[in-house]
Image: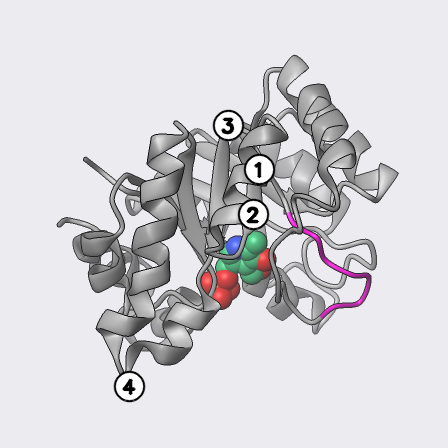
Amino acid sequence: MITKLSVNINKIATLRNSRGGNTPDLLKIAMDCERFGAQGITVHPRPDERHIRYKDVRDLKGILTTEFNIEGNPKEQKFIDLVMETKPAQVTLVPDNTGQLTSDHGWDTIANKDFLIDCIANFKKAGIRTSVFVDPDIKMIEGAKAAGTDRIELYTEEYAKNYTNNKEQAVKPFILAAKKANELDLGINAGHDLSLENLHYFAQNVEGLLEVSIGHALISDALYFGLENTIQLYLRKLMC
Ligand code: PXP
C-alpha cells in the first residue's frame, strides 16, 4: 500500500509574507512539489492570514493537479465558505484557536459531536472528503466515526517527541489507534512533526496509513538538500 505524501506549504507563505512581495513564489513551489513527486498539497489558512492567504487557496485550486487538502477550523464561517467555494479533494477539520502558533490538540469528538456531524455532512454533500484531526485516543476515534467522517488525521507530535527516547513506546498508541480506525472503516492520515528521522518507522508500523502531511521538517530539510531531493527522500521513507 502506498502512503501519499502531501506537502504542507504554509512555511513557504510565511517566508514570502515576511518581505511583502512574491518571493518565494508559492504557486510555483506548489507546482514544483507536484513535479518532484508529491502526491498532494496541503494548506492551513488561518483567520489572520499570517501565512496562507485566502487568495492563495483560490489560486492554488486553479493550478494543482494532485490532491488538494485544506486544513482549518470550521467554527469560522469564512473557512467553511472558502472550502465550499474551492472544493478541494479533502478538508481536514482542526480545532485551532485563533492566533494559535500551530495545531496542538485533536478534536474532542464527543463534546463536539453535533457540531461535527453538521459540518461533515455539509462538506460531504458538496463532494469533499472529510478528515478529522484527533489524538490517538480510541474514544475520540469512535467519536469521529459517529460524526460521519471519511478519515481521521492522527496528531503525531507525541510520537515525534518520544521517538528518540523509545520509538516502540512512542508508536504504540498510534498502532492501537490505527487498528481501531481500520475496524471502523475509517481512512487514516497523519501529521505534525513527522521528519526524515521518524517517518519510516511510523509508516512501517501504522497499518493502513493513507497519507501524511508534512511541512516544517520537509521545508527545513530542503534548505540543505534542495526541494526535489528532499521530496524524493521523504517518498523513499514511505516505501515500506
Ligand atoms: N497536520 C495539521 C493538522 C497541522 O496543523 C500541521 C501544521 O500546520 C501539520 C499536519 C503539519 O505539521 P508539520 O509542519 O509539523 O509537518
The residues tagged by marks 3 and 4 sit, at their Cα atoms, a distance apart of: 33 Å
The amino acid sitting under disc 3 is: Asp
- Would you call the spot at circle 2 few (<14 residues within 10 Å), some (14-19), or many (20 or more)? many
Q: Secondary structure at mark 2?
A: helix
Q: Which residues are magenta?
A: 94-100
Q: Secondary structure at mark 3?
A: loop
In the picture, measured across the screen, residue 7 lies left or right of residue 170, that is right
The amino acid sitting under disc 2 is: Met
Judged by its main secondary structure, the magenta piece is: loop
Look at the numbered discs 2 and 3 and tell me whether their residues touch, using CB distance below 8 Å.
no
Q: Is residue 236 visible?
A: yes
Residue where numbered disc 1 is placed: 144
Q: Position of residue 5 (x, y in %)?
A: 34, 47
Q: Is residue 24 visible?
A: no
In the picture, measured across the screen, residue 4 lies left or right of residue 142, that is left
Residue where numbered disc 4 is placed: 165
The residue lying toward the viewer, choosing from 64 and 168, is 168
Residue where numbered disc 2 is placed: 140
The residue lying toward the viewer, choosing from 80 and 156, is 156
Question: Is residue 40 shown above or below 119?
Answer: below
Q: Residue at x 71, y 72 (%)?
A: 19
Q: Position of residue 175 (x, y in %)?
A: 30, 53
Q: Earlier in the sequence, mark 4 or mark 1?
A: 1
The residues tagged by marks 4 and 1 sit, at their Cα atoms, a distance apart of: 30 Å
